[in-house]
Every structure is written in structure tokens, then in C-alpha cells.
Image (spheres, grey):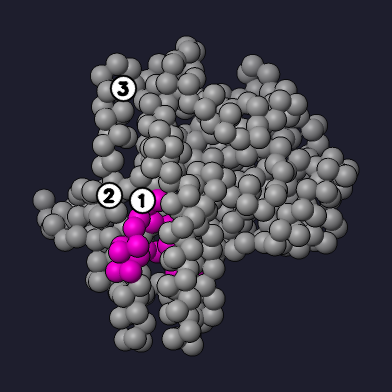
Amino acid sequence: MKTEEIIDIEDKYFINTFNRVPIVLDHGEGVKVWDIEDKEYLDFLAGIAVNCLGHNHPKLVGAIQEQAEKLIHISSIYYNEPATVYAKRLVDATCFDRIFFANSGAEANEGAIKLALKYSGKSEVLFCGDSFHGRTFLTLSVTDHPEYSAPYVKNLPKGFKKVEFANLESVAEAITDETAAIIIEPVQGEGGVHIATEEFYKGLNDLCKEKGVLIIVDEVQSGFGRCGALFAHELFGLKPDIMTVAKGIGGGFPMAAFLATEEVATGFVPGDHGTTFAGSPLAGAAANAVFDVFEEENLVEHSKEMGEYFIQKLSRLKDKYDFIDDVRGVGLLVGIELNFECGDLVGKMLEEGFLINSTAGNVLRFAPPLIVKKAEIDALIDALDKVFDSL
């Protein structure tokens, strides 16, 4: 089928909720992908920070194929080895004691909020300005993007209060006796790649401990090596009680989880929460393969090194073009803030053979596979320079 035929079929049959880029991707290898017309692109979005191993990684593909020949799904009624092995590996790599598997970041965040409310017996949760935690009714209630929540504002659950990101005074003023938790992204991805100071995170630790408020870190986008550490909160000394993960955890296979300390995990008893598909043998096998590659290829350190190189190269463009207001990020979650709306530049970069996206209106966001190399970063920089020069 041709690109136009596929687009026409989708336009006729899909519920219209996406503004898609008008290409049909067909296959990939490493950081490269090809569309159905066999045009090649370098992928600097990685499925929005999901495809951490790039495309068609032999270890991941092999693990999925091998497990699919055994068991794909068995429900949460029975034990299975791959997910159990992975649970131990992930918990042992963190400061947490217990884990619950989910299918998506929104589900993980929803479960984490439910656990915080149930454990504390309180009724309020704080969230930050410019945050994004999902599109379910509960996670929309802690997402500061009115364009997503406006149609449902009359129906959203109550008990959620917005505070200013990176402003400790704003958090302190919002806390009451009914505050169960604050949910926070260590690095705000959808909000425009924003990072708070270490002083803020340290102050948040102290304040929440003093007030008996749990800290939920949303590492859905910032976690699993994306920011040059296994989890971004480790970089800033943030001490969470609950953590959510998704996106890169399965290398492209849908998987997520929330983790908690032993004490907080006691908030749930059998029947308080559940899932049909999460923690399947296939998901466990995929996640174990991703973890293996992280260890074998030292991807966390590689992400740190490539991120530093990437930001250095982007900073040279900032020196060259006065419409670049800021270059920021950590590891391979990087943004360029421009002084104009930049959605059109995504299309211009597509024409140059690069997949990127924009967020917060005027920020170009980059989240390439963690296997990206300097030569691929250099190619992107050259394309950006060409596009910027043409403006």
C-alpha cells in the first residue's frame, strides 16, 4: 500500500484524536527507521523516549520471539518466572522494596496515587505546574495541561492542588493536614524539559518528611537511563516513597510499574488494585532483555556521555542564532527553547530525514535511543543548523 492509501483509511475509520506526521514507518535498525516508501530517517524521538535500545535490537527481538513460543499471557492469577525475575532485578537496583506491574505510564501513576491515598488515609495530592502524568481521569487531575483536561473539568476527581514547580514556598503553602503526597517529575518532559535545583529537591525531602507527606516521583520519561542515571531522581538527591516507571522499561514492548518502600506498600491488600495484562511472561522477558543490554553495553554511562556531547553541540548553535533562548536537559532528554512557536520546524527536520517533536509550543524536544553515537548527533546538528539558517 502507498502512504496516501494508508492515511486515507485511517482518516475514514479511526476516531480522530491524533495529529500525525504524514509518513508511514515500516521498519528500523538501530537509530535508523524507514518509511513505507523506503525513505530513511534518523530517529531522535525513539517513540517518545520508549525505544531505548533503538529498533530491532537482536537481544530484545530474540527474547520476545523465544518467550512468545512458550507463553504470552496468563493473567495475574498465576505466577510466572520472567516477570518475577525482573521484579527482583529492578527492585534490587533501586531504593524501594516492592513493585506492582502496569501497562502504561498513566496506569502506573494512577496506581501510585491510589496507594498514597490508601496508605495515608488522607484526601489531597499536590502536583506541579507544567506537569504531565497521563490522560486517565485521575492522572488528568494532576496534569497541568488545560488543553487535555478542559473538556472534562467538571468531571475530574477533587482533592488535587497545583503548586509551582521548583518553588519550595509554593509547596509549603499548599500542604494541609489532608495532604497525602506530592507527585513530581524530576525532569519535566512534556512541560518543556525543565529541571529544578538540587536545593529545591533537598528542601522538598526535608519539608515532606517534616509534614508526613509522601513523595511520588514520576520517572516514566526521565527514568531508565534516559537522563544519564538509572533514574533521574538519583542525580538530584530526591528521596521518594513511591516511583513510577514505563516507556523505556520494555524497550518498546508496553510495560510499566510503580515501586514503593516496604512501609508504604502495606497500604494495599489483596483486592485494592489489579490488572489483567500487566506483568505478563512476554513483558517480563522483554524487560529482562533490556536490563541485560543495559548492563552489557553500559548504556547508562553512554547516555550520560552522549547527552553531554549533544548539549555541547546544541550550545554552539545557541551562540550562533539569537532566536534560541535556552538549551537544557540532562542525559539524552534535551530541549531547545526558541522565542517563537516551533511546530513547523518538526516538518522541516522531517524533510531533512530526522524524527523529532516539539512540546510546550516553543521547545524542540530530543529523546533519541540510548545507543545513539556522536556521528548521528553530528548529523542532526548539521540538519538543525541548515534549517535554522533558512529561517
CA distance separating discs 1 and 2: 8 Å
Q: Mark 1 = which residue?
A: 371
Q: Which span of residues is magenta-colored?
A: 355-379
Q: Mark 2 = which residue?
A: 30
| Image: 93 above or below 163 | above
Rendering coords of residue 388 (x, y %)? 36, 82
User: In the rendered structure, which disc, 1 or 2, sits on the residue that comes first in sequence?
Assistant: 2
Closer to the camera: disc 3 or disc 2? 2
Question: Of the residues shown, which amino acid type is indicated by label 1?
Answer: Ile
Residue at x 54%, y 44% (from the top left corner) = 230
Q: Is residue 143 visible?
A: no
Residue at x 43%, y 80% (from the top left corner) = 317
Question: Of the residues shown, which amino acid type is indicated by label 2?
Answer: Gly
Residue at x 63%, y 26% (from the top left corner) = 98
CA distance separating discs 3 and 2: 22 Å
Front residue of 281 and 177: 281
**Pointer 1 local density, CA inside 10 Å: few below 14, some 14–19, many at least 20:** some
Asked whether residue 216 is drawn in magenta, I would say: no
**Pointer 3 local density, CA inside 10 Å: few below 14, some 14–19, many at least 20:** some
